[in-house]
Amino acid sequence: MKVLILKTKEEACEWVANHLILAIKEFKPTPEKKFLVLGLPTGSTPVPVYEKLVKAYQNNEISFKNVVTFNMDEYLGLAPTHNQSYHYFMDENLFNHIDLPKSQIHILDGLASNPQQECVDYEEKIASFGGIDIQLGGIGENGHLAFNEPGTSFDSLTHVQQLTDNTIEVNSRFFEKKSDVPQKALTIGLQTIFNAKEVIVLALGEKKAEAVYKSVRGEVSYLCPASMIQNHSNGIFVVDEAAALKLS
């Protein structure tokens, strides 16, 4: 695992965006490998990255026609049209502004009649594309990746996750009130993330400093899910100086 510390959040986001732009530019489809498969997160952290990807597309630097995406998670019980659903977030921040075909976009269905089967089908769909090539993710203040809370098995695949009160509290800023935040979510598992050929964890701001420290310098433990990236052969933490505060 590598750790890249950049001075500001803008520089960190620019590095990640440029890394993705280069991967898209360099990808050449073959009969065996038709698409570059990206795993994508939501939340405030990746928004500047998505802005830079949109700008690169608008400037004719890249096309997304040979890209397939899998989002990390979705709230259980929210319709895709709900303004706090991750379907809505991705459309607003990325998908509505680029040439990525709708058929190549994959997001877990928060209204699935059988959530467990939805999770099984999602894993099978990822496998059908040969797995995720680049998994981008943020990190929660408690070290969670996607909605994999502390205590989640490193062997976990896509599943239904009960959210902790801490995660609900943190995410309540996006809702009118805390009670509006769904109690459960559908999320890719920690093994799903670890199976990606490359994993990039983007962490910004002082509030993430403790989680970054535990993930990078602490014991590899299911109590801090992001610590598993220490064992990934192609994992990298990209952080600004504020998030790296406890590493010095």
Image (tube, rainbow, N blue to C red):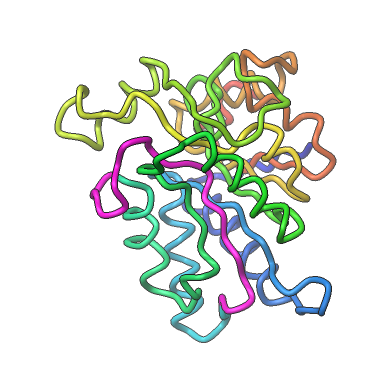
Give 52 or 98, whichever is nearer the viewer: 98
Give 70 or 77, whichever is nearer the viewer: 77
Q: Is residue 125 above or below residue 215?
A: below
Residue 125 sits in quarter: bottom right
For the point 73% across and 26% down, the residue is 155
Q: Tell me which secondary structure the magenta stretch mostly adopts.
A: loop
Relative to 209, 233 lies left or right: right
For the point 45% across and 61% down, the residue is 50
Give 173 or 148, whichever is nearer the viewer: 148
Q: Is residue 23 above or below residue 90?
A: below
Residue sticking out furthest to the left: 176
Image quadrant containing the N terminus: top right
Is 241 part of what is drawn in magenta? no
Relative to 38, 13 lies left or right: left
Q: Position of residue 177 (x, y in %)?
A: 16, 27
Range covered by the magenta-colored residues? 64-84
